[in-house]
Amino acid sequence: MAAAPEPMQVDVSTSNHAATETQVFHIGTRSSILARVQADEVLKALRQAWPHHQFEIHAMNTAGDNNQKTALYKFNDKALWTQELEVLLQEGQLDFIVHSLKDMPTQLPHDLDLGCVTKRLDPRDGLVIKPSLKDKYHSLADLPEGSIVGTSSLRRTALMKKHYPHLKFTDVRGNIGTRLAKLDNPDSEYSAIVLAVCGLQRTGMENRVSMHLSKSNGGMHHAVGQGALGIETRKDDKRVLELLSRIECSKTTRQALAERSLMRILEGGCSVPIGVETEWVARSSYVAESSSVGVMPSDDYDKLTGVATAASQASRPQDEGAEPESSDEMIMRAIVVSLDGSETAEVETRKLVRNKVDAEQFGRDVAKALVEKGAAKILENIMLNRKIIDEQGQA
Ligand SMILES: NCc1[nH]cc(CCC(=O)O)c1CC(=O)O
């Protein structure tokens, strides 16, 4: 039987339109499981936005992966998690790099840029309690006197020393899986560890979180950039910036720029304990004052901030890149805390933030307000103490 004649087709594949011309993009990432999941998250979004293009992921170890001993703050100027990848980007072997925004230094090499920020997941820290104690204790306040909480973060340690002086804090290093294994080992000293919720979400382990920590339920601000992915590009690489423009989240980008501009001013290139929370509010509906304290249920928090959980993000169209209502204001709550938790400078303020310029200015305004409340003195003391410790080390 003769086959029915094919309907006549117009061949569009030879059209030279940029959107249909296949290009290959090379994506750089660290090789930890979390980093690969994050690179994959970006790759999937790009495939959806640009079905004709091809993407290849290149994973490698960085100094941060290879050195688990040196105090983290000593690395801070040296782009611990980013430098090896940046060289490949500069050489053109990579087209862009996917990072945890939190790990990106606020000062990038002069020829590179934060080219895109995608939609943030939950930015909060999560308390993970040892399995054998999990049914008995549910919060930091619950844990008995002298319990050991593992974290290597200056910010987390300082904030917990301030609010939970009955606890003890020790270092726990390694990637998420390693840290959880150390906690779960029945012989380990830890009663609990604190990890970023988003890292657990992305690796399918959010069920390990006993409590989501925030300013309102116990004074724990999260880190600058936490929960968001930052994509590093060559400066003015129009081809790559156009590619990434389709997956950028405008709201997260402005939060990220505000938080990073705050930190850029306060840290002066050094690692210091700064905590922050930013959220969007519609001006008309915002009535609560900064003094309101209380436990905010996780669902309400998500609604308020526009933060997506991993599940809701997967099913939600990428509509958040649109400009916000002109009435959208950003609230920023920020804190600088001494290493022992005894001194703090704290600010809560809000401002209409319509674009990236507004966002960076907002961060600078909040930094200035913090300095007026004593942040400079706290930071100066931290630097001075480090200098003394370093010189003792050399003697
Ligand atoms: N400190 C290391 C680090 N860098 C980025 C993340 C994941 C969180 C993020 O992407 O913001 C983590 C782990 C953690 O803080 O638990």
Image (tube, rainbow, N blue to C red):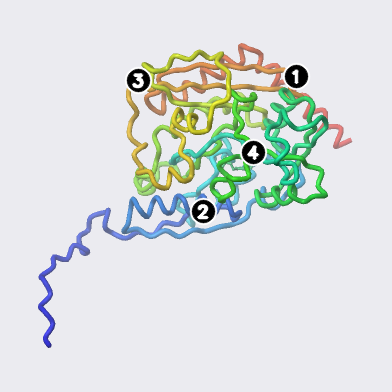
Give the residue number, with chain letter if any, for mark 2. Answer: 28
354 to 79, vertically: above or below: above
Q: Crowding near pointer 4: few (<14 within 10 Å), some, many (20+)?
A: some
Q: Crowding near pointer 3: few (<14 within 10 Å), some, many (20+)?
A: some
Circle 2: element type: strand
Marks 3 and 1, Cα distance to the nearest angstrom? 38 Å
Give the residue number, with chain letter if any, for mark 4. Answer: 210
Marks 2 and 1, Cα distance to the nearest angstrom? 41 Å
Marks 4 and 3, Cα distance to the nearest angstrom? 36 Å
User: Is 374 displayed left or right of 261 in the figure?
Assistant: right
177 to 191, vertically: above or below: below
User: Is 153 displayed left or right of 186 in the figure?
Assistant: left
Circle 4: element type: loop
329 to 175, vertically: above or below: above
Quarter of the image for residue 109 reads: top right
Q: What residue type is labelled 4?
A: Ser
Q: Which residue lies furthest to the front in this view?
A: 135
Q: Residue 327 carries which label?
A: 3
Q: Position of residue 326 (x, y in %)?
A: 33, 22
Marks 3 and 2, Cα distance to the nearest angstrom? 38 Å
Residue 348 makes an appearance in the image: yes
Q: Which of marks 3 and 1 is nearer the N terminus?
A: 3
Tell me the quarter of the image containing the N terminus: bottom left
Circle 1: element type: loop
Total labels: the figure holds 4
